[in-house]
Image (spheres, rainbow, N blue to C red):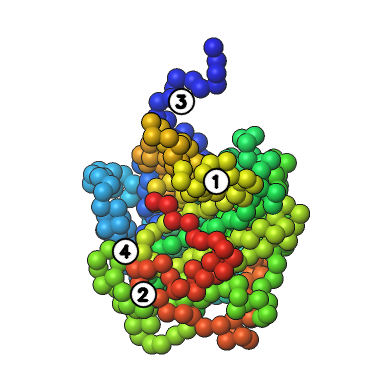
Amino acid sequence: MDNGIHNKTRQKSTGSQLLPVEPFDIVVFGATGDLALRKLLPALFHRWRDGQIPEDCKIIGASRTTMSREIFITQVETRYRTHYPDEKNGTNDWQAFARHLHYCALDVASEDANWQELEALLDGREDKIRLFYLALPPGLFGPVSANIGARGLNTAQARIVLEKPIGHDLNSARAINHAVGKVFPEKSIFRIDHYLGKETVQNLLILRFTNSLFEPIWNANVVDHVQVTVAETVGAGNRASYYDTSGALRDMVQNHMLQLLCLVAMEPPNDFGADTIRDEKIKVLRALRPITPASAAKDTVRGQYRDGAINGTAVPGYADELGQPTDTETYTALKVHVDNWRWSGVPFYLRTGKCMKERRSEIVIQFKSIAHALTSPEAGHLHPTRLVIRLQPDEGVKLLLMTKDPGPGGMRLRYVPLNLSYADTFCARYPDAYERVLMAVVRNDLGLFMRRDEVEAAWAWIDGILGAWHSEDVHSQSYAAGTDGPTQGAMLIDRDGREWFDYL
Ligand code: BG6
């Protein structure tokens, strides 16, 4: 009998099927920066190692530093080995991959003569897919696009990839979108939010819209509230000078956390087409209730880590790392409302922080408590049903349910998960989010990227909070590194008779 579970799916899946991509060239601007060396170039190496990078591909690093191609290649390999000590790659692998690597010293913002060198490396191949990846501060997005346009490098097959942050408020985001839009059509602009490339984030749509179980209960009738947590153990470290111009609200909420919220809250799209999904997400962003000066003190919390210890290691405070006092928040918690029919009265609690006690990103959908308890209090405490979608570190989905503790001894209750652990169910390694988003750009799959109106709607909402913090003097509360954030973060949810969910 075919019950839909074939033998081969009973075994661990090998996890990935390789979709070949067309030959392409990629220019990584900011190639000696942290993002390029820690994420982008390793991601391309991994795709190459899995056989996905066609032979006829150039990976061209561009940055201001003058250095030879050989030194660039050594730098890429050295940083790779530092960041991925467990990956065992022989020298032969690197030599073969390095054939794809090229380097061009270039002051991207000026009309430097070295653009000619870049043009030469691109060989005038107009038919070939061409990616310009701007791993650069957003202030350079306009000037670089203009230079690409002036040199006529924006061919029909060219795509521009913009790293977040796209600006630091609505006005600067609009200016960037306008400047880039003068050179590239919207269909060729890929605004990265690498969270959209995470396996469990992609799975959210599948979970919601391909199982009949969830959609009927995914609304204010049954859901009590939603929590989204992105906690990191790392601090601002060597990014403090960038981070201090940003803070947690701009760095994490404006993009990653709002995208997660959108995927949880959106209406079912008609299909999985890029614009169909983006049309639904933007409706959520537009339905976010503005946080005003009147509500900011109650519905938002800012925090900043002071010195402390994480896993037994002493950690300096943020201001000490920066070398000066500052009010920038390294933690924020928000109570958010999505003002539409589906979510009326259901709060979404968001929190994110650096130097927290553990690295954990998850979404918790907490369902309403049952109307009438049939068991006696002696049997055990009744917990609400929760669906926990864990993004990292141990990806998986858990449905937490009350069950009877088996065995004699009367009726005793236990709260246990139905557990879909990715590590146990699928292969040990699946591509990092950057591997997936890079290949999606080559394949022209815009679904994993933010459209202009999404970015601007998100900024419009964030600007309201920034304005309220400013006008109401909402300052960062201090928390010790290695803890759960400031007590005000716990109070934000506690006040509503709820608590942040901690299930390890
Ligand atoms: C980046 C932020 O976008 O995301 C960083 O700028 C943050 O501050 C990072 O550390 C978190 O990404 P991940 O994939 O490690 O959760």
Q: Please, is residue 124 above or below residue 49 in the view? A: below
Dot 2 falls on a residue whose secondary structure is strand
Asked whether the beta carbons under mark 2 and mark 4 sit within 8 Å of each other, the answer is no
Horizontal side of 86 relative to 484 (left or right) equals left
Q: Find the distance from the CA under tag 3 to the CA under tag 4.
A: 49 Å
Q: Find the distance from the CA under tag 2 to the CA under tag 4.
A: 45 Å
Which of the two discs, 2 and 1, labels the residue nearer the N terminus?
1
x, y percentage for residue 414?
Answer: 44, 42
Using the image, tell me which numbered label, if any, was put on residue 68. 4
Q: Find the distance from the CA under tag 2 to the CA under tag 3.
A: 46 Å
Q: Please, is residue 226 above or below residue 9 in the view? A: below
* Residue where numbered disc 1 is placed: 385
The kind of residue tagged 2 is Ala
x, y percentage for residue 388?
Answer: 50, 48
Q: Find the distance from the CA under tag 2 to the CA under tag 1.
A: 32 Å
Dot 4 falls on a residue whose secondary structure is loop
Asked whether the beta carbons under mark 2 and mark 3 sit within 8 Å of each other, the answer is no
Which of the two discs, 3 and 1, labels the residue nearer the N terminus?
3
The kind of residue tagged 1 is Thr
**Residue 282 visible to an observer of this rendering:** no
Mark 3: few/some/many CA within 10 Å (<14, 14-19, 20+)? few
**Residue 75 visible to an observer of this rendering:** yes
Q: Nearer the viewer, mark 4 or mark 1?
A: 1
Which of the two discs, 3 and 4, labels the residue nearer the N terminus?
3
